[in-house]
Image (spheres, helix red, strand yellow):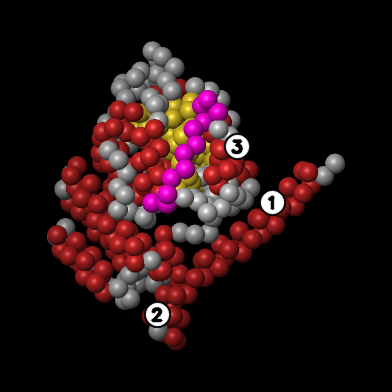
Amino acid sequence: MSVGAVRPLVSILIPAFNAERWIADAITSALGQTWEHLELVIVDDGSTDRTLPIARGFASARVSVVGRPHQGAAAARNTALSLCQGDYVQWLDADDLLAPDKLRRQLDAARDCPDNRTLLSCEWGHFFYRPRTAVFRPTALWGDLAPLEWLVRKLDQNLFMPLSTWLVSRELTEAAGPWDERLSLDDDGEYFCRVLLASDQTRFVPQARALYRRTGGGSVSTLRSSRRGLESQCLSIQLHISHIRSLDDGERVRRACLRYLQRWLIYFYPERLDVVRRFEEFAAALGGRLDPPRLPPKYAWIQRAFGWRVAKHAWHELPRLRSSLVRAWDRALFDVEKRYARAP
């Protein structure tokens, strides 16, 4: 549907699981869009906290709230997708936010696009508790790019865009197909690979903004504790490589895929040699090989003194510790600001 011809309906789809702390803010940011022709579909994926009753407090003619048994984020997203009516789809995680003019800016840009096969993206910044402190750091993905170029840069430099940055036409959404419910980790990365495969180009819209909340969890910690998470990440990596090679199988693409495998290898080495062997088979199919993983030089003294496993543990845990301290400080400031805001 041409944006210039009619005023398109945007469906904002929010899957939620145990998000009572953030869900109201996410919904409020969606309802606060200056583009008012929209609907919200919120799917609670079997939360055990107050997420569902909080979401139901927003129910209205344009806000649908559905509760369902817990089956994972990808299944919840497929449910939301099956219920929406929009000409465009805006994905929003229950702990993230949209700037008020995000949709309007992207839809204004869509007027200049030749058809509905253009995938719209935008700036994004990360924050912990206080959205106004969000840090926006441009990457090589912040630009108008052909789908192949976008994917090569993603794999080659290990970059990503939060799903809330995208605005996807109904045509592209239908072409990409459903979310892969086998994936519990990196399901969004794999899904948007398929959206990119179906697109003609990406259009980056400066000043349109999405805000990505850093909650302290993450795929790496899940990999260490969950067999399902490990299998999901391995499958997602395999699918990423398959998707990009379906567009082009030249030398540059193969080099990017090999670097992608090499970066991920350290998370499995040496604890999961079965995964290491699987990665080596992937590399051989690409006409290359993987080197034993190396830690950054600043951890070399730990490795010399205490061995690889201790050094790898330090490499993994020390950044998390620094992040948790920054997060705790930001939460303290957030609580103080809330207290003063409520004061008479």
Residue that numbered label 1 is attached to: 334
Q: Which residues are magenta?
A: 60-71
Above or below, comparing residue 150 to residue 291 in the picture: above
Query: What residue is drawn where x is 34% and y is 62%?
Result: 228
Secondary structure type for disc 3: loop
Q: Give the residue at mark 3.
A: 57
Q: Of the residues shown, which amino acid type is indicated by label 3?
A: Gly
* Residue to which mark 2 is pinned: 309
User: 10 Å neighbourhood of mark 2: few (<14), some, or many (≥20)?
Assistant: some
**x and y, in percent, of residue 336 in the image:** 75, 52
Say if 194 sits above or below 302 in the image.
above
The quarter of the rendered structure image containing the C terminus is top right
Q: Nearer the viewer, mark 2 or mark 3?
A: 3
* The N terminus - image quarter: top left
State the residue in front, 11 or 82: 82
Secondary structure state at the residue bearing disc 1? helix
